[in-house]
Image (cartoon, grey):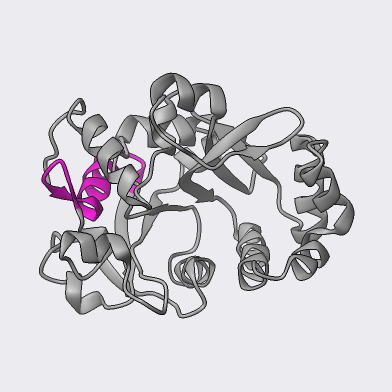
Amino acid sequence: MSASTASAPVTALVLAGTRPGRPDPLAQMAGVSHKALLPIGGVPMVLRVIAALRDVPAISRIAVCVDSPHVLADKLPPDILLLPAQPGGPSASVLAGLARFGTPLLVTTADNALLQAAWVEEFLSAIQPQSDMAACVATQDAVQRAVPNTRRTYIRLADMTFSGCNMFLFKSAVSARVADLWQRVEQNRKNPLRVALALGPLVLLRALTGRLTRAALYRRIVKLTGAQAELVPLSDGRAAVDVDKPDDVVVAEQLAAALPPIHI
């Protein structure tokens, strides 16, 4: 972990909300009110994530952000903070978390059900000292080597093809501007023209044609936000497995069987 991150206790924010509209199909399938309560290896996903975060020495407190906090109030350990999810989506909840807790803020999701403390520590230790914000990823090779039977969504840059690991560190105050940018993209995700205007048409064109490099992406983020951002690839491709669809439940159950038991 970089010296600046090591010197400041990290707050962890777990996003466990449900998108507005119809109920989550995985929650319905499992007969639970929120997908976060879907059990993997017999343990609700959100509790698996909390257990992993508790084993990271740098993390001093954990908050769970959910649209109906009272639903989880009696299901989480008493020291876990509960926050209401923001109606603007995950990025809005991250901005609210930054406003309340400041930085450094580690953000992950309740459906990151296989999360291991070692992955969090590897991520934190690999972040460059000059970075304001970092996103955890796993390369396509690492994912396919570790979990050949999973189907992931990959982002292809000129110098790396990767899948997200649902883990981010907002390390300094200026990183909130990256969350602002994320919110603009999220709000316009169904309007490609507006996304292009937010990111820049040339950057979007390079991304679509596979010619966008990490360095060019970082430069664009600096220009848009003033924040230094980076992608941090983990060595274990299992870190890219989250639980978004029924097939993911099957894969996660198989992988969870080989992981150490959960202690809350």
In front here: 154 or 246? Answer: 246
Residue 128 falls in which quadrant of the image? top right
> Residue at point 47% right, 34% down?
123
Q: Position of residue 50 (x, y in %)?
A: 25, 50
Based on the picture, tell me whether residue 56 belongs to the magenta stretch.
yes
Q: Is 144 placed above or below 182 here?
A: above
Q: Position of residue 27 (x, y in %)?
A: 25, 63
Q: Position of residue 34 (x, y in %)?
A: 25, 67
Residue 26 falls in which quadrant of the image? bottom left
Relative side of 249 to 234, left or right: left
Q: Position of residue 149 (x, y in %)?
A: 38, 28
Based on the picture, tell me whether residue 134 belongs to the magenta stretch.
no
Q: Is residue 155 visible?
A: yes
Q: Is 16 placed above or below 3 here?
A: below
> Residue at point 33% right, 73% down?
83
- The residues colored magenta run 39-59
Relative side of 114 to 237, left or right: left
Relative side of 232 to 166, left or right: right
* Residue at the outermost right position: 202
Residue 159 falls in which quadrant of the image? top right
> Residue at point 67% right, 29% down?
160
Q: Is residue 80 visible?
A: no
In front here: 204 or 214? Answer: 204
Q: In the rendered picture of this protein, how many numbered marks are placed on residues?
A: 0
